Amino acid sequence: MKHSNVCYIHDRKSGFKAVEKAKACKNEFGLDLFRHNGSVYEGRTGLRMLFESELSNLSTVIDEKGGLPKIIEIIESQISKNGESPRYTRPNERKQDIFPPNPVKENNVEYGQAIKAAEGSILNKQAILNTDIHGKSLIMQLFREHEIVVPLRTQGWIIKSLSDIYFNEKFEKWNYHYLRGSKDSKVFNGYLPLLVSAVHTKQQYEEMGNGEDSLDYSADIKNENEDDLEM
């Protein structure tokens, strides 16, 4: 049965509502299931079927509820009560129709990716071009992200004259190139090691954080207004 790529959840107060962050769940039973916010929903009804933590035991869950024929019977019964999800009644609907692109959000994502990639280059001793990201100098933004105060005059030099930074293998230190026709900075060499050190410090803190145990509450998240697939 044809359906769109937009997933809907059924809310007892407001009916069907589209959810942006949902992921399809392939399964051997041919059911249209999708994951969202720690739960697994049935696509035709938009009703919660089980928690995501139970997905690996889907076969057992279905057997306990009377088998696949019984599940299909329940789905049809729920459709007769609430109607069928717009995922099926509007099969040609697209995600961009419901969730139009957000230029600001997309720019922020792109900016964050550029900063992270540049930090990775420093950690791996790879050169970084002082490219433009949405009208801003990448290397200048690195200084700002790491809260390194640079004099205004030097900021201007970084934005207008700095070409790239690179690791000099021969002298085992970071260096830079500036654009032809520009004058060299008298102080930038003193700020560059601060940036490199800040990036390494951030990495150390992140590694310490990733090593800590944390509790996963995702399976306990539940909207009281959302209906379950009554099995």
Image: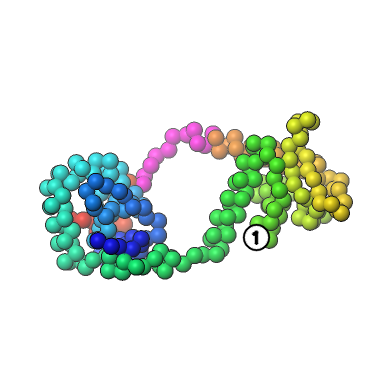
In this view, the residue in front, 54 or 90, is 90
Q: Which residues are magenta?
A: 208-218
Position of residue 192 relative to residue 80, above or below, is above
Q: Find residue 172 and report its horizontal and vertical position in percent.
A: 76, 31
Question: In the rendered image, is residue 200 in sight?
Answer: no
Q: Quadrant of residue 187?
A: top right
The quarter of the image holding the N terminus is bottom left
Mark 1 neighbour class, 10 Å CA radius: few under 14, some 14 to 19, many 20 or more:
few
45 shown above or below 113: below
36 in the magenta segment: no
Q: What color scheme is it?
A: rainbow
Residue 43 image point, x, y percent: 27, 58
Residue extending furthest toward the front: 2
Where, by quadrant of the figure, is residue 8 drawn? Answer: bottom left
**Left-right relation of 5 to 78:** right
Which residue is pictured at 36% across the width and 46% down the height?
Answer: 218
Kindly state the secondary structure of the residue where label 1 is placed: loop
| Residue 73 position (above or below residue 126) | below
Q: Which residue is mark 1?
A: 134
Please identify the dominant SS of the magenta region. loop
Q: Residue at x 16, y 53 (%)?
A: 71
Question: Which picture quadrant has residue 18?
Answer: bottom left
Q: Judge by depth and name the residue closer to the eye, 95 or 200.
A: 95
